[in-house]
Each structure stands twice: as structure tokens, then as C-alpha cells.
Image (cartoon, rainbow, N blue to C red):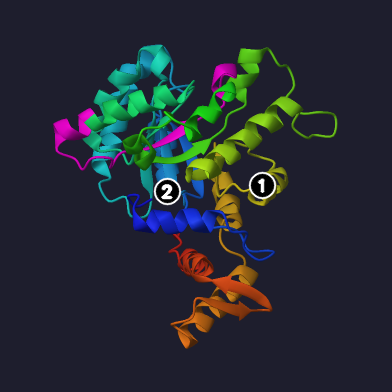
Amino acid sequence: MPPRGADDEEARRLSNLAPPPGVRRVGTSPPLRSLLFVPGDSERKQAKAVASAADVLILDLEDSVAPAHLSAARGQVCELLQARPDRSAQQLWVRANALASGLLLEDLTGVFPGSPDGIVLPKASSAAEVCEVSHYLAALEARDGRQAGSTRLIVIATETAQALLRLGEYSRPPGLSPPTLARLAGLTWGSEDLSAALGITHKNDRQGSLTFTFQLARSMCVLTAAAIGVQAIDGVFLDYRDLEGLKRDIESARRDGFTGKLAIHPDQIEAINMAFLPADTEVQWARRVVAAFSAEPEAGVLSVDGQMVDRPHLVQARRILELAARPRRVI
């Protein structure tokens, strides 16, 4: 996402407008559709992930790396980052350990020479924790001569009971500081750690739907992301062999306002990427809106398909067309 300013003010206006039926909201920069977790200590899985069409690889130093291997994994992740300086087709992020673990600073200093595109922060319990991590990133950027705020953040915002109860802090003072909010690219939600924290044995009811606690966590994630103007990213679908179940899960995520999804296996990427591309009907609507304003460039409000559209809808339409024209990696 670009720095906040006049364009961001336009984006905020846009976020409060409901698009026509069948047309999804699109933000001010192309959302990250597919974000694939990759163990930080597995060269084989990293090679397979790099060859995938995932928009983002999340090189994991947390759950997938045993404590005894963490130091080596930091070095391996840094080497991969340094070996792939061109991130135009695929961004490289790092999931560090939680602030409360006492391992976060070592993770950050270990991978920062490779200039990760962003950090995924797990088990964040409050807005204050997110601000603290943002301060660490700012200090490392200043030390290395990098642009302030260039290392983005995605927060896994629902992994503890405290985190879920304090999500409201993100959108009210003192909440997130302006530099932290400018750095924040998105919020996502997690169920596995929340299950463990609460002692929950089943996340789904007999019909296969999420139980109330997890519906609440998911809904609070997308609501908070909308309130602060960042991307809402859906959590993982664990059964990577069940592609039909994945497609249903993605459709639910799209319907509820998520614009990207975490993945745990390269086989999930194609379905995720395709689901979060604009549909033909959306592209056709966008073209009609752009054509209408091109014909009457001084107009503030026009009628398209019998509905009123104004300048924020034009911004929406242009973004949809940019997404539709997004290059697709050939693998």
C-alpha cells in the first residue's frame, strides 16, 4: 500500500461506499491474494514454494521450526532473501516469533540483512505490542539506511483470548501510532493457537461450520481491518488435499470481505489466486464506469446501468481493471 495522504483519504471514502451488487471492494494497491507459509529450515520446500505462483512466500521461523534449529533457520532464510533481490513477481516475508517469546529481536536482526518485504507478527496481544514491533523495524531500517516504513507488517490478530478481546484498540486512540498504521499491510486471523489457548477440542460444528468463537474471531478480524483501512486476509485451510473444500472456503472469505488468503501448500495457490481475481462481470462494470467518465470528464456523478456512480466508484473501477491486468506467473 502507498503512504497515507490524499490518495488514502480517497480510499477511505471508497471503503465506506457499497459497490453495485456483484462487485467487490478493491483497495488502493493490489491486494496480496495468496500468502504461502514455508518452513524456514527446509531448502526443499523453499525451492518448491519459489516455483509456485504465490504472491507472497512467508518464510516461517515460528511454528514450523524446532527451537534447536532456529539459529540455522534464520541464516537459511537470510540467504534466500539475499539470493532473490527482485521481488516484483513474488514478495518474500518472514514470520518471526511472537514478541512475548523473547526471540523476536534475534529473528529480526538475523533476517534483516536480506531486506524482507515484510514481517508477519504472530500472537500479538494488543495494539501496543504491534507499535513496539514497528519501533524495532524502524530502528533496523534506520541502521541499514532503508526507507522508513518500507518493511511492512501483517498481524495475526486473534491467536490469544486477550488479542481477540483487545482488537477494538486498533481503531480507537491511542491505538496504532501513525507510523505503525502506515506500515501495517493487513490483518489475518488464526484458529489453531486460539484453540489451544481456550482448550477447545473442535472448531467446527456437526454441519462443518465454524463454531461461534471462531466465527467471532474471523468476523472481528475483517471488521477491524476495514475500520483501520488495511487488507483483511483469511486464515489457512488445513486439508490441502481437499480442493473442493478449499474453493468453498475461499468463496465464503470473498463474500465476507476478505481479499486474500493464507496457504500451507503450493497446490492451494492456483485456486486462491483465481478466486481473488475480478470476475468478468466486475471487469465489464469497471470498463463501463471508466468509459462513462471518459466521455464526460468534468462530471461528478453519472448513471451507469441505472445506478448512480461518482468519483470514488471511478477509483474502484480503475483498480479492478488494474487487478484484471495483473501479470500471471507461468509455472
Percent position (x, y) of residue 140? 21, 29
Q: Amino acid at mark 1?
A: Asp
Q: Which mark is residue 256?
A: 1
Would residue 14 appear left or right of 83 to someone viewing this image? right
Identify the residue under disc 2: 51
Residue 117 relative to residue 328: left or right: left
Considering the numbered disc 2 on the image, is that residue within a helix, a strand or a loop? loop
Locate residue 132, reporting x and y percent. Answer: 34, 23
Q: Is residue 147 magenta?
A: yes
**Part of the protein shown in magenta:** 139-163
The percent coordinates of residue 250 (x first, y second) are: 65, 47
Q: Earlier in the sequence, mark 2 or mark 1?
A: 2
Q: Vertically, is 174 above or below 30?
A: above
Structural crowding at the residue carrying mark 2, measured as other residues with C-alpha within 10 Å and reported as few (<14), some (14–19) or many (≥20)? few
Residue at image coords 57%, 32%: 189
Asked whether the viewer can see residue 265, the reply is: no
- Amino acid type of the residue tagged 2 in the rendering: Ala
Q: Nearer the viewer, residue 165 or 78?
A: 165
